[in-house]
Image: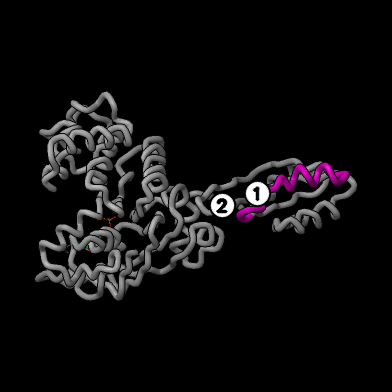
Amino acid sequence: MITLTNISKVFNSKQKTIHAVTDINLDIEKGEIYGIIGYSGAGKSTLIRILNLLETPTCGEVIVHGQNLNQLTSRQLRKSRQQIGMVFQHFNLLWSRTVRENIAFPLEIAGCGREELNERVLELIKLVGLEGREDAYPSELSGGQKQRVGIARALANKPSILLCDEATSALDPQTTDSILDLLSTINKTLNITIVLITHEMHVIQKICNRVSVMENGAIIESGNVLEVFTNPKQKTTQNFVKQVIEDDDSNEIINHLIKQYPDGEIVILKYIKNDIDEPAISNAIKKFNTHINILHGKIVQTSNGSYGTLYTQFTGDDIQPCIDYLIGRGIKVEVINK
Ligand SMILES: Nc1ncnc2c1ncn2[C@@H]1O[C@H](COP(=O)(O)OP(=O)(O)OP(=O)(O)O)[C@@H](O)[C@H]1O
């Protein structure tokens, strides 16, 4: 539904030439939430602005719904942009207009009739949970509420694609989660494709189906979120993954657990995907004469499934058969040599 082919963007100034985006190829499917993550200066904003041609690429093609945006006239491009809504980090609201009037703005521009406009605005206010705040001005709203207005305004003309340019970066963690929940609901209930850029892996983990990692203007790694989380290949990707799950395989933790729990065995269990749906540990405890004591660990939920690591203490008579059973359930098991 969105295809980028050999997209590059070069900014030329008197002083220097900047290669902001270099030879990017990307396919984004209808109905998915696609995340693009990278550090500051990686080229994310430039890339997302190329998706609706707010930024013209130096070379390459942008195809949306089979339409090559580069070949459209200005009038055709304006029409085509109505199917692409955009949400910004700093909300970009009109400060002299109320919530209702901000949301109505794109409908007025599109020439929508008064009755239809009022109906649509009410619908959107309800969708983003701002009932009762219709007549407030942006200065009277919290950051999360401002972003709800931004989202409602972006959805006013019923787009099929929503672009989110660091939509949660100006918000605290709790508000970030509530906005991510809203985006996820919009994606599911309205079947809107969402493309977001971020520098926070938490955002990718929480709502994205697929992810690309950008560095120096290029995509260095892409894939299903669970695959990228469980097997990050590039150093930058590994650093992003550490934002949400600390590298637990440290000798320090293991040495501490060995000292504190001298009985039985210290066993590391690594879960990937659906294994978590089966109560493998409680089944193992029922089946074998073994106690499993969970000491430390973290399970991360992604939209493709869960994964994580548990540090445990095994005691009792049937430790090896119990371990074999867990391996048979698809869990990676490592027994720590004491
Ligand atoms: N209009 C412009 N003119 C010149 N250089 C630009 C322009 N826009 C972006 N750049 C440069 O292109 C590179 C990529 O910038 P971009 O804003 O796309 O990165 P980013 O990953 O979104 O970073 P950030 O998260 O800090 O916004 C940077 O070196 C930036 O200085």
Q: Position of residue 228 (x, y in %)?
A: 50, 61
Is residue 88 visible in the rendered image? The answer is: no
In 3D space, how far apart are the residues under numbered discs 1 and 2 (Cα atoms)?
9 Å
Is residue 284 visible in the rendered image? The answer is: yes
Q: What amino acid does circle 1 point to?
A: Ile
Q: Quadrant of residue 94?
A: top left
Residue at screen point 20% across, 54% down: 82
Question: Is residue 176 left or right of 290 when viewed as pictured?
Answer: left
Residue at screen point 24% across, 46% down: 154
Find out whether residue 328 is within the magenta segment: no
- Indicate the secondary structure of the residue bearing disc 1: helix
State which region is magenta: 272-290
Residue at screen point 80% across, 47% down: 284
| Quarter that holds the N terminus | bottom left
Q: Position of residue 241 (x, y in %)?
A: 49, 55
Q: Position of residue 220 (x, y in %)?
A: 41, 69
- Indicate the secondary structure of the residue bearing disc 2: strand
Give the crowd class for mark 1: few <14, some 14-19, many >=20 residues within 10 Å.
some
Residue nearer the viewer, 209 or 131: 131
Q: Quadrant of residue 251?
A: bottom right
Give the crowd class for mark 2: few <14, some 14-19, many >=20 residues within 10 Å.
some
Residue with the most extreme top position: 132
Residue at screen point 83% across, 46% down: 264
Q: Which residue is under mark 2?
A: 305
* Cβ–Cβ under 8 Å for marks 1 and 2: yes
Q: Which residue is under mark 1?
A: 276
Q: Quadrant of ligand 1?
A: bottom left
Q: Main secondary structure of the magenta part?
A: helix
Q: Relative to 161, does residue 132 appear above or below in the rendering?
A: above
> Is the shortest distance between ligand 1 and the CB of mark 1 under 8 Å?
no
Q: Position of residue 44 (x, y in %)?
A: 30, 60
